[in-house]
Amino acid sequence: MFEMGASLEGDSWETKRLKDPKKSFEKIEKKQHQLVFTFEKRRGKPVTLVGRFFMRDKEKKEVLKLLKTKLGCGGTVKDEWIEIQGNKKEQIIEVLETDGWKFRKK
């Protein structure tokens, strides 16, 4: 009788699973970011958008908290983007590099 999850005799149909899929996902996740920096003015005040963070909300909030404390400014998370008050592109890059992020040199 066929049961759910039963191994079929003959060829092996079982797939190999990762021992801890969360750890391997986190390793890949930091490498896949290709950050885009944009600058906007909203109601006459500068805002720097750092974007396309494809990670969990908790991790985005940790990055935001790091940036806000190191730069001494306000900010928020919206979708995949982090918004920082002020024109702070170079300072954001410096803070993230000291935290272990890698950027292409121009």
Image (cartoon, rainbow, N blue to C red):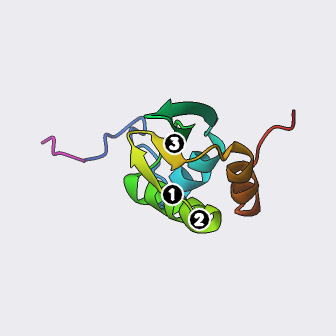
Query: Are the residues flagged by discs 2 and 1 in contact, CB closer than 8 Å?
Result: no
Magenta: predominant secondary structure element?
loop
Quote the CA–CA distance across marks 2 and 3.
21 Å
User: Which quadrant holds residue 69?
Assistant: bottom right
User: Which quadrant holds residue 97?
Assistant: bottom right
The amino acid type, in three-letter code, at marker 3 is: Phe
Residue topped by disc 1: 64
Place of residue 24 in the rendered image (x, y in percent of width and height, measured from the top left): 55, 54
Task: Between residue 46 and residue 7, name the one nearer to us.
Answer: 46
Place of residue 10 in the rendered image (x, y in percent of width and height, measured from the top left): 39, 36
Task: Between residue 55 and residue 21, name the one nearer to us.
Answer: 55
**Seen in the image, is 39 located left or right of residue 58?**
right
Residue topped by disc 2: 72
Q: Nearer the viewer, mark 3 or mark 1?
A: 1
Report helix, strand or loop for mark 1.
Answer: helix
Dot label at residue 101: none
For residue 35, above or below residue 64? above
For residue 4, above or below residue 98? above
First reached walking from the N terminus: tag 3 or tag 1: 3
> Which span is picked out in magenta?
1-5
